[in-house]
Image: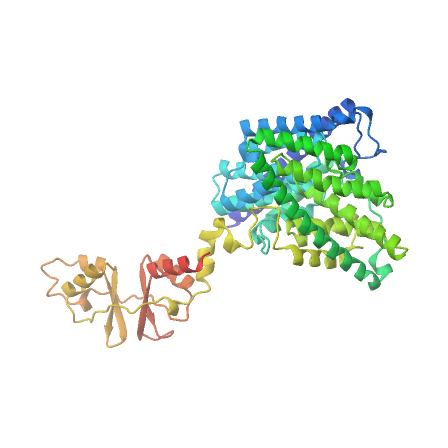
Amino acid sequence: MLLGILRLYVFFPTLVGLGAGLLVLLFITTLNAVSDLVLGRLLGIKIPQPPGLNGGGEATLSLPELAYLLPLVMAGGALLSEILVQLVAPEAHGMSGDAVVQAYHRRKRLSLKTSLVKLIASAVVIGTGGPVGRLSPSALIGAGIADSLSKIFRLSATERRILIAVGFGAGLSAVLKAPLAGAIMSSEVFFRRDFEAQALLPSFIASVVSYSVFGTVFGFEPLFHVSVTPFSERGFSDIPLFVGLALVCTLVVKLFIRFFLFTRKRMERLFPSPYLRVFIGGLSAGGVCYLFPVATGGGLGWVQTVLDGKHDDYSLLVGGFLGVLLGMSLLLGSGASGGIFGPSLVMGGFLGALYGTALEKLLGLDNLDIPSLVVVGMVSFLAGVANAPLANIILVSEVTGGYELLVPSMISVFITYLLTSRETVYPSQLDTRFDSPAYRSDLGMFVLERLKVRDYMSTPLTVAPEDSVRYAHSLLEKNLIGGLPVVVGDYLVGIVTRSDVLKVSEEERERKRVGEVMSKDLEVVTPDETLSEALKLMVGRGVGRLPVVERKGSRKLVGIIARADIGRAIRENLP
């Protein structure tokens, strides 16, 4: 028992966290190298990085002379990555997050090869300027490692599913530098209205390990440097501001999801070839980034400039928001490698800044704490897109390094999630565990715990102690059953099974009475007991049916419950 707990909750999570931390470290290092070579040295474009990823220095919105090549460079990067994916690991195609959700629910395989291919493909797409995210690819890297370990150690389907969720959280925790939020995200992201509770404890271990490995190179400071006014100093008068921000995020999230899904469907219909599709997607996204340079590379680093006070630069805010929305929809909609989490944070941050700036300009409100609106906008937008409210509330504390925005984020995230949870950018994300094919075997027992024996028992065939064994045998053979209750009047006195009958030779069956061969060692159930309790008794005793008595301590027979009845109950009550 103890070894089993340590195995699932310590040993495997530690291995997953170590592998995820190392590969995410390699991923970000490779991405930075590609970006420096292609965008920096070839095109002369400098993209800011978040401080937590060793970012720093000044970047400019003005493009250098060779920037007109950006569409071709981005299209080439998308095509090169797609060729790699299709030839080596087709399961790594497209949006990283949805690939993990699909592997979780549909048992589609991931692997270490998937992780490595996704690492290279996403580094090429983002490094050549693609306005997509690095968070979801990191999550897929962790999930791929977890699935590989489950195959090597021959884990059960349930253990594999839990470990995939753990790997997802470990990869996310490293690149976000938010171990608690990443761990909780691993339990939320697979469902719109449910929670994978079994993954939570092992995710804590894996996320801490991956965060520690990643932090040894990139440091342990938060992803962004944020200075906000504590909510306690501003008072509850600011609550309407965050309610309004939540409503704005809700509206924009809904429009964004519909636009993204429309774009993807159109791209698939217009360009059936995946190679042509990603080339066109890269070319189009490159054109968007040429018009809106902030979107180049996903725009994550520009959020820091907004947090630093450049929220009155409309070319930065509007260009960044529109550029990321359009560019990411075109590129990810074409099937290119990348993620949607990072761009969602960026769009939410820009939206929060635009919201605060508009209130200042249009309504004459002053003394607004714009960085607070930026941070709350980030997590609210991502909560709406990913259907992960709890993780994003925790993310606020890990991004800001404190609890100053906990109350506003709870309010805004709750409203946004409540109003958007029926929509998702992930086709594989399901409502609850009842809808998941992976849970069908597990949920069978869960369903049985809610159903009563009285609703599925049947009227039994019975014999009396004085009946002949031959008569009992004929009833068993005619009705294809394995046992018969033996009764005196309505009261149960024993049970005679097929094996009891077969112990008696054919010559003696007419002479022998049922009372002589029946078993008096009885297991019974009552109508008020659950089907789960009945099944456990059947399995424990190795029998296929149980007599049902009126109540505990009684021997008055009122029915019989068989394994076939329990199977029918599962079929009728599972989705």
Closer to us: 62 or 565:
62
Q: Residue 71 location, x and y as percent?
A: 71, 29
Q: Picture coordinates of residue 288 (x, y %)?
A: 73, 35
Does any portion of residue 394 appear in the rendered image? no
Q: Is residue 225 positioned above or below 127 on the image? A: below
Q: Is residue 306 above or below residue 441?
A: above
Q: Is residue 498 above or below residue 528?
A: above
Which residue is outermost to the left? 507
**Relative to 404, residue 291 above or below:** above
Closer to the camera, 90 or 420? 420
- Residue reaching furthest top? 42
Q: Is residue 413 visible?
A: yes
| Depth order, front residue of 37/206 | 37
What x and y, as percent, mark residue 132?
69, 37
Dividing the picture into quarters, in which one does residue 310 lie? Answer: top right
| Residue projecting furthest to the bottom | 489
Q: Quadrant of residue 175?
A: top right
Q: Position of residue 214 (x, y in %)?
A: 70, 36
